[in-house]
Every structure is written in C-alpha cells, then in structure tokens.
Amino acid sequence: PAEVRALLGLASSRIIATNDLEVVPLLEKVIAIQPMSYEAHYQLGGIRERQERLDDAQRHFRTAAQSKPDSLDALSSLGILSFRLGRMSDAFEAFDILARDHH
C-alpha cells in the first residue's frame, strides 16, 4: 500500500540521518499494518542491535528472514547476532540456510 511505502521511505531517510528515536515509531506502524514487512523488521533489527537490545534485534532479523527467505542480509545478520548471543543452534541454522540456498 502507498501508506507503507511512504512510511518506509520516511524511515529510511531518518536512518540515513541516524535518528533512531524518530524511526522506531514509523517502523512499528509499518509492522502494525504489514506484520511480515521485510524492510521494517530488517531495519528495526539493525536499530535494536545498535541499541544493544539484542533479543529484540534477533527477533526482528528472524522475522525478516522468514518473510524473505532469500535475503542474504537478514540471514547473515541473524546468524552473526545469534552467534554473539551464544545461541549456536540459531546461528548454525541461519548459516546452514545461507550455505544451502545461496552457494
């Protein structure tokens, strides 16, 4: 929908300006409208990782990877973050998908 594209565009412009406080509500609104929005979950995962809210970041990266299974970015972010969190089975699962589906 046009509203989602507008919100994502606005969020992207704020991310470039590194204004996370303005971006989060926009991305959350997108997710309320489109719960499986790859762009919103991936961007929110990156913000939460920068904020050291790692459990939230992992959840958003996982949802992004589920909504767009061919996404190298979401899968690699999920794998690396899971490894950082010591969640090896989650990390291996993400890396296995990357190796199997993106060789």
Image: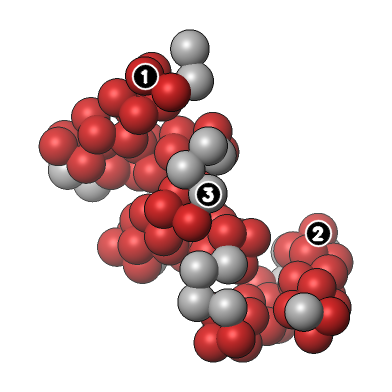
Q: Which residue is painted at 53% across and 64% down in the image?
A: 41
Q: Earlier in the sequence, mark 3 or mark 2?
A: 2
Is residue 55 or residue 50 the one in the foreground? 55
Q: Is residue 95 above or below residue 3?
A: above
Corner quadrant of residue 3: bottom right
Q: Marks 1/2: CA distance?
A: 33 Å
Q: What amino acid is at disc 2?
A: Ile
- Tell me where residue 98 sits by quadrant: top left
Q: Earlier in the sequence, mark 1 or mark 2?
A: 2
Q: On the rendered image, what quadrant is the N terminus found in? A: bottom right
User: Label 1 amino acid?
Assistant: Arg
Decide: few, some or many residues near mark 3? Use Cα within 10 Å; few <14, some 14-19, many ≥20: some
Q: Which mark is residue 16?
A: 2
Q: Nearer the viewer, mark 3 or mark 2?
A: 3
What's the CA distance linking mark 3 and mark 1?
16 Å
Q: Read off the residue under disc 3.
A: 68
Residue picked out by circle 1: 100
**Does dot 2 land on a helix, a strand or a loop?**
helix
**Residue 81 location (% of width, % of height):** 35, 43
